[in-house]
Image (cartoon, coloured by chain):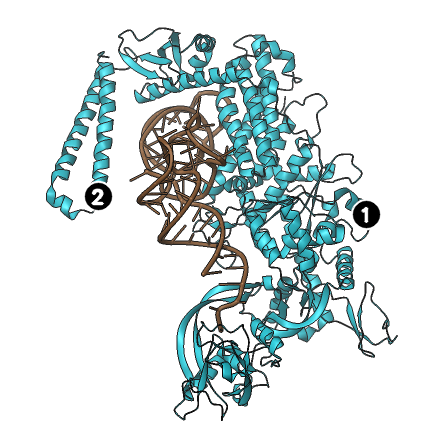
Chain colours: A cyan, B brown
RNA sequence: GGGCGCUUAGCUCAGCUGGUCCAGAGCACCUGUCUUACACACAGGGGGUCGGGGGUUCGAAUCCCUCAGCGCCCACCA
C-alpha cells in the first residue's frame, strides 16, 4: 500500500524532478529518421542575455501547448531552442558595464571588447533557457542554437554572398536613421516614431542681391525674402537649396536664382521640384540633403550637393560657422533660432505635433544622416513572400495581421543591414588597398581577387542582428549543408511570436525561406497579445510593474502560470495581469492543479493498484451516469481538438477545465461515489471503476498540453492501460468516440441535475438544515424522465439529501414548488421539516419592511423639490430600486401564499 | 493624415458566421457547510439597460452608420 497522498499538491516538489526525468528519457528529442510526420516550431530566439518575462511566458507556453499536442497526436514534434546575440542590445549592456569602470569600448579596442562581450554572454547567457525548462517547455535541447555559432555564422555569410552575387546586396550613400548614442545606422524598422509636441519655426531667407521678386514680402532694409518652415532649425546650416513647386506662380521666376542663407553666409539656389507643396506653409522648402531623406531625393533630382553638418554624435561639425561648431544639435537649435531672431529673420513660431523617430534600443532621437551603408534590395524578395500569403500558404492568427503584412510587403523599402558596431557578424567584404577592388567572399580571402595584392582590409561593420534571425528556421537545421535535419524538418509549421516583430522577423523569415530554400518556413503564424499590468501599461523594468514568471512558479507552480497566460487572452489580444495581486491572477490555476491532484487521489483510493478494466469490457453494465460522462468526454475531446486546430488555445484550455471540473469532478465523481464504495453491487462498481479510469485518463490527456506537470504526476500514479506509453507526454491524444455519444443520456442527466438543483435551492431558500432530509414529490415531464429519476433515487438521496421520493403532485399540501424547464414539477412538503409558523412570521415581517420602503420611496419621488434638485440619474436610480423592491415583495408574497396552503 | 483593434457583472475575461446554452465563467461579495478527493473545497444567492445614439430585421451583445474613450500599426507634409 502506497503512502497516502497529501490533500494539497506541491508543484515545487514535483515539477523540476519530473522535467529532468522527461529530458533524461529523451522525450523532447526529435528524430529526423522517424517515419512519423514531422511538426516543427522554431522558438523566437530570446536575447542571449535576457531574463524570462511574462511575454516569454505567454508565447512559450503557447508553443509548448502546440508542441505537446502534436507530439501526442503522433507527430515527430520538434521545437528548436536557441538564443540571439542581439547585436546592438547586448553591446549596449556591456558598454554600460564598461562605463561604470569609466571606460569606453574604444579604450579596450575591438578585440578586447569582443572578448569582454563573449565573457559576459557566457556568464549570463543561457539563463533564459534554464528558465524555459522551469516552465515546462518541451524543447529539443540537443539542437540548441545561437546566432553567432559557427554554423549559423556560415549561413549568414553564405546568404550575404549569394545576395551580392544576385545583385540584391549593394553599398550605397543614402540617408539612413542614425543613432547618435549607439553610433550606428539603424533600419527603418529600428527607428520607432513617437508622437511629440514640438514647434515649427518659420525662417526668412533673403534673396540674393539684385534678384527681383515683386510678389514677395520685404525686410526692413528692402530685401525680398522667402519663408521656409522647419522643425529642426539647426539643419538650416546644412541647407544647399530652397525648393519650390515648378508651377507655383509666386516663385516660378525665382527658380535658378539664389538666396542668401543666413548665418552660414552661403548663397544657395532656388530649385524647382514637385516635392514642394504649394498648399503647405509658404510653398517653399529648405533643402538639407545630408540630413533629410526627402531633401536628399530632391537634391539627387536637381543636382544640388549634400553637406553634412553634424558629427556622428550629432554635434555641429566644422562645416558650420565657428559660432555653432561643437554645439550639440539641441543647443545648436536654440542658438540658430536666437540668431535668426536677432537678425529679424524669424518669421513666426508655431506649436506643432509630429512623430519623431527614436532608437528602438536606447530611446535616443534618431538623426537622419547621409552615410555609406550596405543595403538589401527587398522588392524581389517581397514579391514571392506576399504571394505566399495571398495563396493561403502562410496564414495569420488572428487573420487581420495578414493585411498589415500585405501593406508592408507592398510598400517595402530597402533594408539597411550594416551596423557600426563590433558585436555581431562581420560583413564579409574586403577592400584592396592596392587597386581598390571590393572582394565579397565566403572564405576570408588572403589576396585581392583582381590585382593579387595581399593588402586587404575587411569592412569594419557588422550586420544587423536580424540578418541572422531571418535565417533561423533553416540555419538552425544545418543550412547551407543539406543535412538530415534540414530534409526532415524544413519547412516548419507554426510560428508563435509578438506582433512587434512581424516586420523585423516574421516577414523577413518568409522571404528568406522562399529565397534560399524555395519554400515557406512555416504555414501558420500565431501572434500573441502584449502582457500588461492592471492599469493597461506594458510591463517593463523601468516601470517596475513586471511579474517574474519564476516567482510565479515558486508560489503557484508552472502549471498555474501556464493556465493563466493561456486562458487569459486570445490571439492578438492583450492580457492584463495585476502585479500587486498575484493571487487574483494565478490562484485559479493553482486551484485547478489542486483539483486535478485531488481527483487523482480520489481515483487512487477507489481504483487502487487493481489492473485496469476497459469500458468495453463492462459495456453492458454501464449506467446512466457512466454513459453520460463518456458522452461528455467524447464531446470535450472533439471540441478541445477543434479549438487547438484553430489556434484557439484559450478555448481549448477552458473547455478542458469545464469538462474536468464541471462535469467530471462536480457530477460524475459525486454520482459514482456510492457505487465505487460498492453500495450498488459488484457489477455497478466494476462499471463505475472502468468509467472513472477511462474518463480521468482522457481528461488528463486533454489537459496535458496546458498543464503538463500536474497531469503527468497524476497520470503516473494511476493504473496504466495495457500497452500504454511510459509517460503521459508521449501517450496518444484522445479521439472522439461517436459510439459513446449519447444524446439521451445527456438529456436525462441534465434533468437529474435540474431536479437536484431545484431541491438544493429550496433547501437553501427555506434554511433547511444540512442534516435534515426532505421528502420529495415529482411529476415527471415524460416517461423517460420518470424512469431515469426512478433509477437515480440514490443520487437524489445523496446529492440533494432527499429522504424519500414519490411520483405524485402537491395535492394542496403546504410546501415549496419549482417547475423545471422541461415541465417537471418538483415539490417539497415543508410541514414537519421547518417551523412553518416561524417562517410565515419571517416572511410577513420581510414584506412589511419592503412595503415601508416602497411607500417611502414613492413619497420621496413625489417630492418636487427633491426631483428638481436631483440629477436625473439619481431619480432613475430610485425608480430602479423601487421596481426591485416590488419584485422582491412579489416573490415573498408567493412564498407566503404557498406556506399558507392557498395555492 | 490613413488603416485596424478594443469597450459585456467590482476585477480578469468567454460569448464563432444574428433568434434553446443570450445575458455567461473565474475571482471578489453575501448565506450556509470542515458532508473521509479537494476549505486552493462544497452548496445556495445577489449583481450587468452587453460604451452612448441611430438604423436594418419578426427578432441584435451579435449586422450597418455615427459619436466617445482607450490602444496598436502605417505615413516624406517641410
Q: Quadrant of residue A723?
A: top right
Using residue A176 as the reference point, say whether residue A595 is left or right of it.
left
Residue A137 placement (x, y as % from top left): 64, 42
User: What quarter of the picture does the C terminus of chain A occupy?
Assistant: top left
Q: Is residue A830 above or below residue A291?
A: above
On the question of residue A186 being in view, the answer is yes
Query: Alpha-carbon distance for marks 2 and 1?
Result: 75 Å
Using residue A781 as the reference point, say whether residue A84 is left or right of it.
right
Residue A8 placement (x, y as % from top left): 53, 32
Q: Is residue A91 above or below residue B20?
A: below
The chain letter under disc 2 is A
Location of mark 1 (residue): A483
| Secondary-structure class at tag 1 | loop
Frontmost residue, A341 versus A227:
A227
Location of mark 2 (residue): A874
Frontmost residue, A619 versus A583:
A619
Mark 1 Cα shell of 10 Å, populated few (<14), some (14-19), many (≥20): few
Frontmost residue, A394 versus A155:
A394
Name the residue rendered at 83%, 79% in the picture: A434
Total numbered labels placed on residues in the image: 2
Residue A638 placement (x, y as % from top left): 58, 28
The chain letter under disc 1 is A
Mark 2 Cα shell of 10 Å, populated few (<14), some (14-19), many (≥20): few
Amino acid at each position: 500500500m502506497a503512502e497516502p497522498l497529501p490533500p494539497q499538491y506541491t508543484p515545487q516538489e514535483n515539477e523540476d524532478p519530473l522535467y529532468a526525468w522527461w529530458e533524461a528519457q529523451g522525450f523532447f528529442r526529435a528524430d529526423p529518421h522517424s517515419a512519423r510526420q514531422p511538426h516543427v516550431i522554431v522558438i523566437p530566439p530570446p536575447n542571449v542575455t535576457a531574463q524570462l518575462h511574462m511575454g516569454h511566458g505567454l508565447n512559450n507556453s503557447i508553443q509548448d501547448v502546440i508542441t505537446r499536442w502534436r507530439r501526442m497526436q503522433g507527430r515527430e514534434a520538434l521545437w528548436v531552442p536557441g538564443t540571439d546575440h542581439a547585436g546592438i542590445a547586448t553591446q549596449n549592456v556591456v558598454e554600460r558595464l564598461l562605463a561604470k569602470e569609466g571606460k569606453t569600448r574604444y579604450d579596450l579596442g575591438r578585440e578586447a571588447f569582443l572578448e569582454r562581450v563573449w565573457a559576459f554572454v557566457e556568464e549570463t547567457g543561457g539563463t533564459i533557457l534554464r528558465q524555459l525548462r522551469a516552465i515546462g517547455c518541451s524543447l529539443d535541447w540537443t539542437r540548441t542554437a545561437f546566432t553567432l555559432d559557427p554554423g549559423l555564422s556560415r549561413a549568414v555569410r553564405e546568404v550575404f554572398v549569394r545576395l551580392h552575387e544576385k545583385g540584391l546586396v549593394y553599398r550605397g550613400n543614402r540617408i539612413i536613421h542614425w543613432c547618435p548614442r549607439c553610433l550606428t545606422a539603424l533600419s527603418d524598422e529600428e527607428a520607432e516614431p513617437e508622437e511629440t509636441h514640438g514647434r515649427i519655426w518659420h525662417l526668412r531667407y533673403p534673396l540674393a542681391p539684385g534678384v527681383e521678386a515683386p510678389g514677395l514680402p520685404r525686410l526692413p532694409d528692402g530685401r525680398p525674402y522667402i519663408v521656409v518652415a522647419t522643425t529642426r532649425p539647426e539643419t538650416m546650416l546644412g541647407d544647399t537649396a530652397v525648393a519650390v513647386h515648378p508651377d507655383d506662380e509666386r516663385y516660378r521666376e525665382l527658380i535658378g536664382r539664389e538666396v542668401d542663407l543666413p548665418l552660414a553666409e552661403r548663397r544657395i539656389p532656388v530649385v524647382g521640384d514637385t516635392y514642394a507643396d504649394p498648399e503647405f506653409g509658404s510653398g517653399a522648402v529648405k533643402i538639407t540633403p545630408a540630413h533629410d531623406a526627402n531633401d536628399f531625393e530632391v537634391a539627387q533630382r536637381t543636382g544640388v550637393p549634400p553637406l553634412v553638418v553634424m558629427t556622428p554624435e550629432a554635434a555641429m561639425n566644422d562645416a558650420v560657422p565657428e559660432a555653432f561648431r561643437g554645439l550639440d544639435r539641441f543647443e545648436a537649435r536654440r542658438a540658430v533660432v536666437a540668431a535668426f531672431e536677432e537678425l529679424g529673420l524669424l518669421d513666426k513660431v508655431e506649436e506643432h505635433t509630429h512623430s519623431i523617430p527614436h532608437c528602438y534600443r536606447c530611446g535616443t532621437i534618431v538623426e537622419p544622416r547621409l552615410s555609406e551603408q550596405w543595403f538589401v534590395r527587398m522588392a524581389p524578395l517581397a514579391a514571392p513572400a506576399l504571394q505566399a500569403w495571398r495563396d493561403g500558404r502562410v496564414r495569420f492568427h488572428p487573420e487581420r495581421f495578414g493585411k498589415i503584412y500585405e501593406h508592408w510587403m507592398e510598400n517595402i523599402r530597402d533594408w539597411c543591414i550594416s551596423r557600426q558596431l563590433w558585436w555581431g557578424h562581420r560583413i564579409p567584404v574586403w577592400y584592396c588597398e592596392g587597386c581598390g577592388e571590393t572582394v565579397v567572399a565566403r572564405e576570408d580571402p588572403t589576396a585581392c581577387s583582381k590585382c593579387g595584392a595581399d593588402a586587404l582590409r575587411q569592412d569594419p561593420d557588422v550586420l544587423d542582428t536580424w540578418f541572422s534571425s531571418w535565417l533561423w528556421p533553416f540555419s538552425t537545421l544545418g543550412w547551407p549543408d543539406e543535412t538530415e535535419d534540414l530534409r526532415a524538418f524544413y519547412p516548419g509549421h507554426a510560428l508563435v511570436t509578438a506582433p512587434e516583430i512581424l516586420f523585423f522577423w516574421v516577414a523577413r523569415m518568409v522571404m528568406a525561406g522562399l529565397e534560399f530554400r524555395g519554400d515557406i518556413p512555416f504555414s501558420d503564424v500565431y501572434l500573441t497579445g502584449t502582457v500588461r499590468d492592471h492599469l493597461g501599461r506594458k510591463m517593463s523594468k523601468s516601470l517596475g510593474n513586471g511579474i517574474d514568471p519564476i516567482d510565479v512558479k515558486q508560489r503557484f507552480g508552472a502549471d498555474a502560470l501556464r493556465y493563466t497566460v493561456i486562458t487569459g487572452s486570445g490571439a492578438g489580444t492583450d492580457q492584463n495581469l495585476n502585479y500587486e495581486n498575484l493571487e487574483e491572477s494565478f490562484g485559479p490555476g493553482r486551484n485547478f492543479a489542486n483539483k486535478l491532484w485531488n481527483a487523482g487521489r480520489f481515483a487512487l483510493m477507489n481504483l487502487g493498484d487493481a489492473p485496469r478494466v476497459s469500458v468495453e469490457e463492462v459495456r453492458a453494465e454501464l449506467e446512466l451516469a457512466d454513459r453520460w460522462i463518456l458522452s461528455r468526454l467524447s464531446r470535450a475531446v472533439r471540441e478541445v481538438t477543434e479549438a487547438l486546430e484553430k489556434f484557439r488555445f484559450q478555448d481549448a484550455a477552458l473547455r478542458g477545465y469545464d469538462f474536468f471540473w464541471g462535469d467530471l469532478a462536480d457530477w460524475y465523481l459525486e454520482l459514482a461515489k456510492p457505487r465505487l464504495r460498492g453500495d450498488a453491487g459488484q457489477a455497478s462498481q466494476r462499471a463505475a471503476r472502468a468509467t472513472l479510469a477511462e474518463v480521468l485518463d482522457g481528461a488528463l490527456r486533454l489537459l496535458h498540453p496546458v498543464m503538463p506537470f500536474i497531469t503527468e504526476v497524476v497520470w503516473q500514479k494511476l493504473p496504466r492501460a495495457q500497452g500504454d506509453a511510459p509517460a503521459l507526454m508521449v501517450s496518444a491524444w484522445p479521439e472522439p468516440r461517436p459510439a459513446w455519444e449519447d444524446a439521451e443520456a445527456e438529456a436525462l442527466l441534465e434533468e437529474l441535475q435540474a431536479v437536484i438543483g431545484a431541491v438544493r435551492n429550496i433547501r437553501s431558500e427555506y434554511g433547511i438544515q444540512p442534516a435534515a432530509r426532505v421528502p420529495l414529490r415529482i411529476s415527471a415531464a415524460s416517461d423517460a424522465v420518470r424512469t431515469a429519476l426512478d433509477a437515480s433515487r440514490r443520487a437524489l438521496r445523496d446529492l440533494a439529501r432527499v429522504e424519500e421520493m414519490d411520483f405524485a403532485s402537491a395535492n394542496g399540501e403546504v410546501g415549496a414548488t419549482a417547475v423545471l424547464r422541461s415541465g417537471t414539477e418538483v415539490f417539497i412538503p415543508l410541514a414537519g421539516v421547518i417551523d412553518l409558523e416561524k417562517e410565515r412570521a419571517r416572511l410577513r415581517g420581510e414584506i412589511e419592511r419592503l412595503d415601508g420602503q416602497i411607500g417611502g420611496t414613492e413619497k420621496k419621488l413625489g417630492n418636487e423639490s427633491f426631483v428638481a434638485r436631483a440629477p436625473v440619474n439619481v431619480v432613475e436610480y430610485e425608480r430602479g430600486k423601487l421596481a426591485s423592491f416590488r419584485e422582491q415583495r412579489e416573490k415573498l408574497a408567493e412564498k407566503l401564499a404557498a406556506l399558507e396552503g392557498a395555492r
